[in-house]
Image: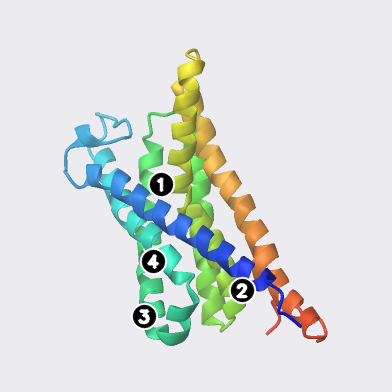
Amino acid sequence: MTASPAPRTSRRRWWALWGLMAVSAIGITAYAVPPYLSGNPADSSVPIDPNVALHYLSLAVHAVPGGLALIIGPLQFMTWPRVRRPGLHRVMGRVYMISVLIASGAAAFAATFSLSGFSIQVAFYLLVVAWLYTLAEAYRSIRRGDVQLHRIWMIRNYALTFAAVSLRVYLAVGLQLKQSFVSLPFDEIYDASGWASILVNVVVAEYFIIQRTLASPARRAASAGLPDRDPLRR
């Protein structure tokens, strides 16, 4: 009797998705962060309000720790560092948490003076609130020793961190469409990209949580002939 290839296929699919996520995170960080290391507002990829002296600085303070969180995130989802190097996992988790706290505070300030319109300001404000809330819930869960719930909240949190990648992907697609639809305003493309980067990521995160984090223990229990247990119950 041969073993089913389904688990091996699932692992390959997981590693392919993880690799795509990690490469995208590194690539966007390498592309988006350097303009804010020069100290020159003219290098900013976002329009700067000339009447607000701290606008460029707030974008820089957001970009650098935000990029760090973007790179750390995929590493935290790997199993072997959590199992073999739990101390390293905790240190990286603290660095990630501090990075998100700094980046979210700077993002709130930068959004206040954004020149891109009210709609995208609202989107960024909601992103900041959700970013901080999911981080707080993840921290509270691990402090209580609820590892499973901590992972769920961290998936949600990193999905919001990864909005930085999704935003630029949607924006690139929108700019390509603009070549065919010249009358399409850039502001509308940017608004749609900003909202989509948040909403689509949230939906994908919830799907991943249901299919992999919550459903997997039930599938393993069923295959082993064990009674189904709530995976959130410790």
Looking at numbered disc 3 in the image, what kind of residue is underneath it? Leu
Q: Earlier in the sequence, mark 2 or mark 1?
A: 1
Amino acid carrying label 4: it is Tyr
State which tag comes first along the sequence, 4 or 1.
Answer: 4
Residue at 53% across, 58% down? 17
- Expressed as whole percent of the image width and height from the top left, the position of residue 98 reads 36, 66
**166 vs 147, nearest the viewer:** 166
Disc nearest the viewer among 4 and 3: 3
Instruction: Give the CA separation, mark 3 to mark 1.
Output: 30 Å
- Res. 108 mark: 1
Question: Gap in Å between the C-alphas at discs 4 and 1?
Answer: 18 Å
Q: Nearer the viewer, residue 6 or 96?
A: 6
Of badges 2 and 1, the one in the foreground is: 2
Q: Which residue matches tag 2?
A: 149
The answer to whether one can see residue 184 in this image is no
Q: Name the residue carrying label 4.
A: 96
Q: As shown in the figure, which amino acid type bears the numbered disc 1?
A: Ala
Residue 64 on image: x %, y % = 29, 53
The residue tagged with tag 3: helix, strand or loop? Answer: helix
